């Protein structure tokens, strides 16, 4: 809802005096997270900056985040930043807007209901167990694995099997490179003053198109396989999408929309959780006390057997570890919207057409909200402490009507993967391996995450821990 600005609303919040916004844009391209930290530190919780002629309001206070995402969400639509994802995702749920978005969201929501997601628990633990079977030699020889690639492969297999009844197999590696390339292209487009035309005869454009073709090829295979199989055998998101009928017209979803939804779930549904898990392993390796407490909980609750969804209420510390990892290193580090009508936030007028940007990375380490914000302390997420916090002090999955549709899926998955693997292995960072944050659309480790697995099962590897072998 657009609101009339009160007489006292000031016109512009403080911010850098860079009228064209080229300098600020350049700073974002160089170091987006550092620039956001600087903006908050220098100018406060509401900052105005021009990003190459685009008036942008940065909102770091949770009340203002909640205002945009939830309280006055009707006044905000997808910003032009989501156009950067359209060449890859088309008009799927993430990039869609308005009535078409609402129709698709209502249609897909039941596939993500808690009770349905709970049925995927076994696939999640089974795939994790299968993955780490390949770590045995590394553990016995003390050689590193790239945990980032491993988690990517795992989450890709999980989302393909559970949502589409499909396997990825040999496609995992090309898909990993393709996802990296399309993300690089999308973030370049967001932080670039000019948009590179799709017809430009440049290697980077050719590579990005090839990456999109790789993704398209896998999506086509998944849909074609299903069309050939007996649809009655399946009870998953894919069959839900394929058999959906419009309540008014009785028409099925057209092929282009079906492909866009599959591509969106396929990409949004693995890369984020993979990053959450990769950063969790990294933070555990750097915080041995938390790692020991996690393993004590797993040993105590599971006693060596495979975890199930029914164990999750007892695995409280496991959940807190995942939540704290997503606080410090949120897989989605920022979101933006465009104001439809004028608004007023924190005493400032937000004119129609301006961009508002919020950042999990900044609000999750806001010193007024979090004590010792840079410390990894899962205890912050006890239910009592979480209840006392502002709802939007922590929003890894966004909020309001466009909250992540896969949040329950992602939390079940992250906890079950962590519980399955941490019972069997602890992971040590390779000491000289550089770890750097790469904020593309998601927050990724720039140089991968090289770690050495140490087995906790006697007789496997060089560093056996307690005698526990999952059943
Ligand atoms: C740790 C893992 C994940 C994180 C941190 C995450 C984060 C987010 C965030 C912040 C949004 C909101 C975007 C916005 O408001 O503009 C979002 C939306 C979305 N997420 Fe996730 N996500 C995760 C896992 C998943 C999974 C597992 C799936 C599917 C299986 C998924 C599918 C989607 C979709 C389709 C949307 C768009 C929803 C809409 O606009 O209606 N995500 N996610």
Image (tube, rainbow, N blue to C red):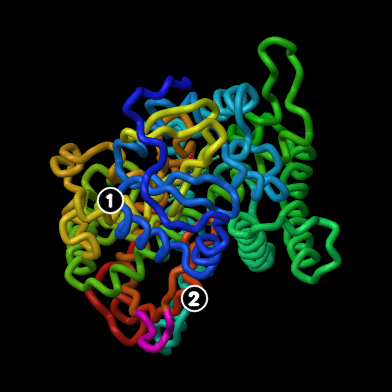
Residue at mark 1: 319
Q: Nearer the viewer, residue 358 or 7?
A: 7
Q: Earlier in the sequence, mark 1 or mark 2?
A: 2
Q: Residue at x 38, y 78 (%)?
A: 453
**Residue 175 seen anywhere in this rendered image of the structure:** no
Q: Quadrant of residue 191?
A: bottom right
Q: Nearer the viewer, residue 351 or 194?
A: 351
Q: Is 312 on the left-hand or right-hand side of 453?
A: left
Up-down: is 176 above or below 63? below
Q: Residues within 10 Å of mark 1 (few under 14, many from 20)?
A: many
Up-down: is 201 above or below 53? below
Q: Which residues are magenta?
A: 429-434
Quarter of the image for the C terminus: give it.
Answer: bottom left
Q: Position of residue 21 (x, y in %)?
A: 54, 57
Q: Quadrant of residue 190?
A: bottom right
Q: Is 4 on the left-hand or right-hand side of 314?
A: right
Look at the numbered disc 1 and give the secondary structure of its residue. Answer: helix
Residue at mark 2: 146
Which disc, if any, is residue 424?
none
State yes or no: residue 433 in magenta: yes
State yes or no: residue 54 in magenta: no
How many numbered dots are placed on residues in this image?
Answer: 2
User: What kind of secondary structure does the magenta stretch mostly adopt?
Assistant: loop
Q: Position of residue 161 (x, y in %)?
A: 58, 48
Q: Residues within 10 Å of mark 2 (few under 14, many from 20)?
A: some
Q: Position of residue 461 (x, y in %)?
A: 36, 83
- Tell me the distance, in whole angstroms, between the alpha carbons under discs 1 and 2: 24 Å
């Amino acid at each position: 809802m657009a609101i009339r600005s009160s007489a006292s609303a000031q016109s512009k919040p403080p911010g850098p005096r860079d009228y064209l916004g080229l300098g600020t844009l350049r700073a974002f391209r160089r170091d987006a997270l550092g620039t956001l930290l600087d903006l908050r530190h220098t100018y406060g919780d509401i900052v105005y900056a021009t990003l190459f002629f685009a008036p942008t309001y940065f909102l770091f206070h949770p009340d203002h985040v909640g205002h945009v995402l939830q309280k006055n969400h009707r006044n905000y639509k997808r910003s032009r930043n989501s156009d950067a994802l359209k060449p890859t995702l088309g008009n799927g749920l993430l990039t869609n807007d308005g009535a078409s978005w609402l129709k698709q969201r209502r249609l897909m929501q039941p596939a993500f209901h808690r009770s349905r997601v709970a049925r995927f628990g076994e696939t999640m633990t089974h795939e994790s167990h299968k993955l780490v079977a390949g770590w045995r030699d590394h553990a016995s020889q003390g050689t590193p694995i790239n945990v980032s690639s491993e988690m990517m492969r795992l989450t890709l297999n999980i989302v393909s099997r559970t949502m589409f009844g499909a396997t990825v197999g040999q496609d995992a590696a090309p898909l990993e490179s393709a996802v990296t390339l399309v993300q690089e292209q999308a973030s370049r487009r967001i932080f670039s003053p000019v948009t590179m035309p799709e017809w430009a005869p440049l290697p980077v454009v050719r590579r990005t198109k090839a990456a999109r073709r790789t993704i398209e090829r896998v999506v086509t295979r998944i849909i074609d396989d299903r069309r050939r199989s007996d649809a009655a055998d399946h009870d998953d998101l894919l069959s839900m999408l394929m058999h959906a009928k419009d309540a008014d017209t009785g028409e099925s979803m057209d092929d282009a929309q079906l492909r866009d939804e599959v591509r969106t779930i396929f990409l949004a549904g693995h890369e984020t959780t993979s990053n959450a898990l990769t950063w969790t392993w990294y933070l555990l390796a750097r915080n041995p006390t938390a790692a020991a407490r996690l393993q004590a909980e797993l040993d105590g609750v599971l006693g060596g057997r495979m975890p199930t969804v029914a164990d999750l209420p007892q695995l409280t510390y496991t959940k807190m570890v995942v939540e704290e990892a997503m606080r410090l290193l949120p897989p989605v580090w920022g979101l933006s919207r465009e104001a439809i009508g004028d608004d007023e936030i924190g005493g400032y007028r937000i004119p129609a057409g301006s961009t508002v940007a919020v950042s999990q990375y900044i609000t999750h380490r806001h010193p007024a909200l979090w004590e010792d914000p840079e410390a990894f302390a899962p205890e912050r997420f006890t239910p009592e402490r979480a209840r006392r916090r502002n709802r939007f002090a922590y929003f890894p999955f966004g909020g309001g009507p466009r909250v992540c549709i896969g949040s329950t899926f992602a939390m079940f998955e992250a906890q079950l993967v962590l519980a399955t693997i941490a019972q069997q292995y602890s992971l040590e960072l390779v000491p000289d391996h550089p770890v750097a944050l790469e904020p593309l659309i998601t927050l990724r480790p720039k140089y991968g995450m090289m770690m050495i697995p140490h087995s906790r099962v006697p007789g496997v590897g060089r560093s056996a821990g307690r005698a526990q072998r999952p059943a």
